[in-house]
């Protein structure tokens, strides 16, 4: 069991790392080489750098993920690939599922179509301390669920 973070634009890396460490889960951040930083070498955290191409981090996460892992991403496409293999959570705390992924993908598509047509669309609201706490609570619940599931499987 490990936590994989789609790291290029993830605003909750610190929270995920802290929870991973407190539960003794390895944490891997997958990010573009464009985001290289010598400060990225945190204890208990591995960083995997991928080429700068589109979806390179997504493909690496798909290759690294295993059953009972947690993937943190805001990329609905990656989430749709992973929900049958792992647990997937958005930085808002939303757990992706078969029940919500098609709606999310459709909303993304409609937003893309509106922008192509010249319509202005709203960006995401500012990420607050309350949002961070909510994410942390949801991630901790997910970790505990998986730990219980693992215990019951053995």
Image (spheres, helix red, strand yellow):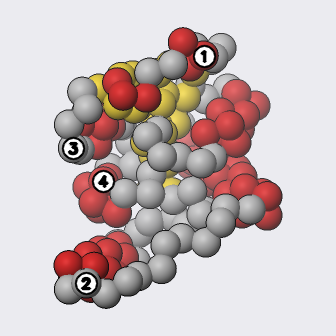
Marked residue nearer the N-terminal end (2 or 3): 3
Residue 25 visible here = yes
Marked residue nearer the N-terminal end (2 or 4): 4
Distance Cα–Cα, label 4 vs label 1: 27 Å
Distance Cα–Cα, label 2 vs label 1: 40 Å
- Mark 3 or 4: the one toward you: 3
Q: Which residue is mark 4?
A: 78
Distance Cα–Cα, label 2 vs label 3: 24 Å
- Picture disc at residue 15: none
Q: Which residue is mark 2?
A: 118
Q: Nearer the viewer, residue 154 or 130?
A: 130
- Picture disc at residue 39: 1
Marked residue nearer the N-terminal end (1 or 3): 1
Distance Cα–Cα, label 3 vs label 4: 12 Å
Q: Nearer the viewer, residue 123 or 9?
A: 123
Which residue appears at 20% of the width and 86% of the height?
117
Marked residue nearer the N-terminal end (3 or 4): 3
Secondary structure under badge 4?
helix
Secondary structure under badge 2?
loop
Q: Is residue 113 above or below residue 72?
A: below
């Amino acid at each position: 069991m490990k936590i994989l973070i789609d790291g290029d634009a993830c605003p909750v890396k610190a929270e995920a790392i802290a929870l991973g460490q407190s539960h003794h889960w390895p944490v891997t951040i997958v990010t573009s080489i464009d985001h290289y930083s010598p400060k990225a070498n945190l204890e208990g955290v591995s960083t995997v750098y991928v080429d700068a191409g589109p979806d390179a981090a997504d493909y690496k996460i798909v290759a690294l993920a295993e059953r009972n892992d947690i993937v943190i991403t805001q990329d609905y496409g990656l989430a749709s690939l992973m929900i049958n293999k792992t647990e997937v959570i958005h930085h808002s705390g939303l757990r992706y599922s078969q029940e919500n992924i098609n709606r999310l993908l459709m909303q993304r598509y409609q937003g893309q179509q509106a922008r192509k047509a010249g319509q202005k669309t709203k960006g995401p609201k500012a990420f607050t301390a309350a949002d961070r706490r909510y994410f942390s609570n949801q991630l901790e619940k997910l970790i505990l669920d998986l730990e219980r599931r693992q215990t019951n499987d053995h």
